[in-house]
Amino acid sequence: MTDLSTSGAAAPRGPHSSSLLVQDANTRKRNAAESRFRLYGVIAIAIAILALFALLGSILYNGSSSFRQAFVVLDVYLDPAKLDKDGTRDLEKIAKVSTFGYAPLIAAAFETKFEDPEIGVEGLSAKNAAKLISKEGPAELRRYVLANPDMIGETVQFEFLASGRIDGYYKGRVTMETAKLDKNVSPEQLQLADQLKEAGVLAIKFNTGFLTRADASENRPEAAGLGVAILGSFYMMIVVLCLALPIGVAASIYLEEFAPKNWITDIIEVNISNLAAVPSIVFGILGLAIFINFAGLPQSAPIVGGLVLTLMTLPTIIIATRASLKAVPPSIRDAALGIGASKMQAVFHHVLPLAAPGILTGTIIGLAQALGETAPLLLIGMVAFVRDFPSAPPEGFFDPAAALPVQVYNWTQRSDPAFVERASGAIIVLMVFLLIMNAIAIVLRRRFERRW
Amino acid sequence: MYDAPNLEKTVDQKEFKITADNVQVFYGDTHAIKDVSVQIEDNTVTAFIGPSGCGKSTFLRCLNRMNDTIDICRVEGNILLDGENIYDKKVDPVQLRAKVGMVFQKPNPFPKSIYDNIAYGPRIHGLTRNKADLDIIVEKSLRRGAIWDEVKDRLDQPGTGLSGGQQQRLCIARAIATEPEVLLMDEPCSALDPIATAQVEELIDELRQDYSVVIVTHSMQQAARVSQKTAFFHLGNLVEYGETSQIFTNPIDPRTESYITGRIG
């Protein structure tokens, strides 16, 4: 430096001649542009995080209450005079008593409760008090009696679901004011519910039924559960996994490693990418036309849903698998071929294990996508109201079933506000499944990557 | 080499291991190898030298049909291994590659244990019937690859965890394990430091006892150090082929002379 300055080099010698300690105009401009860009990035991320929190927050706020439920514990005297008039204990005769025939038993149980001086509201008959119990209650009672006819004549303790309005009262959906206007519930019933809660007869508990019960009709939201939908979705995922993974991986291995590169494979390649962009409802129409109308498979069956979702998942799996096969360095193939492995040995012994983490991740992402897919399932009849659980596989694949996202869609269409809570709860369940699947993808990826 | 004059006498009596006759290689429309004819002897190290892109690696890959894996590559002419044409329709390239092993420019061990790296070739070729035999082959190959002492205590650790020079010797040991007759080496030392290079060169000289070794190299010193025969390629042509000592001291073709004196390349 000193040499330069003494030799009279202070005069400008080029475009970069000014002092390094002072930023020139160009540098200032570039730095300003960079900090502006960083600011945009931070804003974008902040918006994304806010949106995510708003979404998750509203779902959790609306849906978490569906995992809690009001239950009423009652001692019911299984009156032989009503259930088995002849005293023969003949199952066929007992079965003739319909669900309505069991309702008086619950009313009678309230009658006994009213003997307690603490319990009882003026002007509320036992029959009206029995409306605190879900309409599902008598049906449960009947199922129990048909399963245990020996218990007729005994007094048995039952834990009944409280009706939707009573349940809503403890979740803030129903108030004394709204009850006055509501023909389904009266303020007296709510008062009685409070007394029962005081006495420990009515309690708020974790609602396992939400996960295990089947769907229920419009006027008994408290009994609606996700059991059939979870099972149906699970069956579909099995079908998708069993079909999409082998077909997708085989197709990608062939295309990537064996197929000659010519115009035919080029066309196939382009069309696989196109397939990934086809709207999902189109696959539903295809499934309806081919699998149901042409092949004659049953409607609303997990097998048809699985087949349609397989078609949707295939491009995802093929694209992910081909990308991860491409990422395996060619030197590994050379090494295997160089010591006399055949093409297939090179692929299956060396390339495929290295591509496995990518393939697995792609597959699970494809499955997660399929799990949340609604539109194609609407067209193949999975939107139907299904009360019966599908049987065990393989027959179960052909039984009618629901699916989680379709169940959400279904519940959001019903008028009772209790179903809003249920739908949000179902979304929580769906998201938990997606989180579990993504977690599995991450774990598998970590485990296989160590072998690199 | 000092023993080059002695070798010259014995060479004439030896049979040729590989005979290439008018070999042409095309990459699409590019004529990469033009009319190359060369005889490669058994128990000899033959070096291919020449500037980048002259076709020496391409020609080497013809010798075990590795060029088959490139779709647009087309080979014409005959290459005989022990008198049999390896480009005959009846020849399965996989069977050929078991006889003609290859070591690549970049060390490319499998991402598996050191033991499995060596054992893979014998396993797929069915060279052993039991674990004990396999253990013997693995040890023998690693010893001949001059790496046994360094890895004998960690055979179960990944081959990719070794240093570059060790990896390359592991790859040579892996190639030897299938008991080939010819060993092709495509610039085996270009990714190695001088010490590892010296170890590999020493190894190549030892391997000459049992194999015919063909080595492609960019380093003329290396060719002079390890080979008995040298072939000089230029722009897809085989310019000159002969005794290494003759090529480096008294080249016939002016192009060879220009290259080894550093005027072209």
Image (cartoon, grey):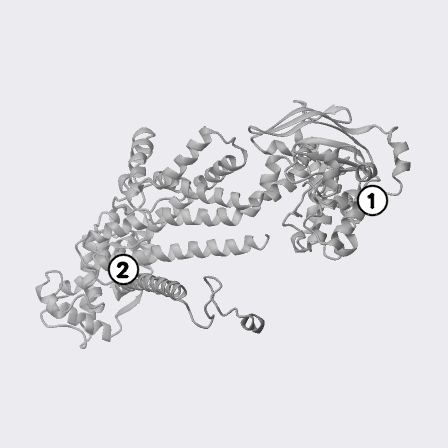
Location of residue B110 in the rendering, given as x and y in whole percent from the top left corner:
64, 47
Q: What residue is shown with label 2?
A: A153
Amino acid carrying label 1: it is Glu
Residue at (38, 54) in percent of width and height: A434
- Callout 1: 10 Å neighbours few (<14), some, many (20+)? some
How many residues crowd mark 2 within 10 Å: few (<14), some (14–19), many (20+)? some
On the image, numbered disc 1 is attached to which residue?
B206
Tally of numbered discs: 2
Q: Is residue B197 left or right of residue A278?
A: right
**Residues at circles 2 and 1 in contact by the CB criterion of under 8 Å:** no
Q: Which image quarter holds the N terminus of chain B?
A: top right
Q: Position of residue B79 (x, y in %)?
A: 71, 26
Q: Is residue A298 left or right of residue B65?
A: left
- The residue nearer to you, when weighing B229 against A314, is B229
Whether labels 2 and 1 belong to a single chain: the reply is no
At 18% from the left and 67% from the top, the residue drawn is: A111
A167 vs A407: above or below: below
Return the residue nearer the eye: A9 or A380.
A9
